[in-house]
Image (cartoon, rainbow, N blue to C red):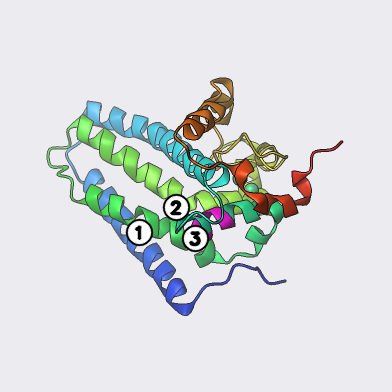
Amino acid sequence: MESTYTRTTGQKAAEAFGVVAAMALISLTTWRVASAPLDMAAIIALGAALGVGVLLADLFSGFVHWLFDRCGTEETPFFGPNFIRAFRFHHKDPLDITLHGFLATNGNTSLATLLPLLLLNMMPIGAGHWSVILVVASLVTASVLTILTNQFHKWAHTKTPPALVVWLQDRGIILGRDHHAVHHVWPHESHFCITTGWLNPVMGRIQFWSRSEALAKRCGIPMYFDDASHAADPSAAPAE
Ligand SMILES: [Zn+2]
Ligand SMILES: [Zn+2]
């Protein structure tokens, strides 16, 4: 079976470039951090940065996902055809993502992280002060996980992912299948974080997304329920 997601040769070349360039920048920055003179405070900062980076990536995935799921319509200039349509199509056909190849899955997220990675690589690590190490290592970790977010999301829909992936999913280390399935229940208004999903319970408890939605409405941004395109979604009709 073929995915409905088609790209031009130019888009595929850009995705390949994004993956290679992101990997090069991540390797270079990691090497710069590892070769800096690290004292005990910097080593502790390095450990803390791993946790901070995971939370940042999960938060970022949730925010972008919420933005394109709930704000604007498929007719919104630029964002509608390029992003909003794909996010809402995923609700109508959640399995199409499992047909995406490596570049289709990881190319765009790699391209999106290139500028931040380039800026990070220009930061002076020099004496390896703990505060610089904390910032750089947190953002590199967040970038790596942001690149992998679509892959984790794809695996959350894959019937038989690799055994190691199932192990990670079952322990909640990466986005779990049952955990993500909650988001796919109409009206898709919770569990937006799709990197690890760790922040979803917190976001639910503080009503982060419904409050953000109320704020967006007050700012006059057209919202999901103004978009008639979801009417074709069989899951859109609540049971009578
Ligand atoms: Zn969604
Ligand atoms: Zn999904």
Establish whether ligand 2 lies closer than 8 Å to the Cβ of label 2.
no
Give the magenta-colored segment's residue range: 81-85
Q: Residue at x 54, y 53 (%)?
A: 84
- Which element type, helix, strand or loop, lies under badge 1? helix
User: Dot 1 corresponds to which residue?
Assistant: 22
Q: Can I make out residue 193 in this image?
A: yes
Q: Is residue 42 located in the magenta-colored stretch of the structure?
A: no
Q: Residue at x 56, y 23 (%)?
A: 207
Q: Position of residue 25 (x, y in %)?
A: 29, 57
Q: Can I make out residue 162 in this image?
A: no
Image quadrant of residue 171? top right
Q: Position of residue 109 (x, y in %)?
A: 44, 56
Image quadrant of residue 188? top right
Left or right: 182 as drawn, with respect to 220:
right
Disc on res. 147: 2
Separation of residues labelled 2 and 3 (CA atoms):
18 Å
Position of 226 relative to 44 (above/below):
below
User: Dot 3 corresponds to which residue?
Assistant: 82
Lower position in the chain sequence, tag 2 or tag 3: 3
Q: Residue at x 65, y 64 (%)?
A: 99
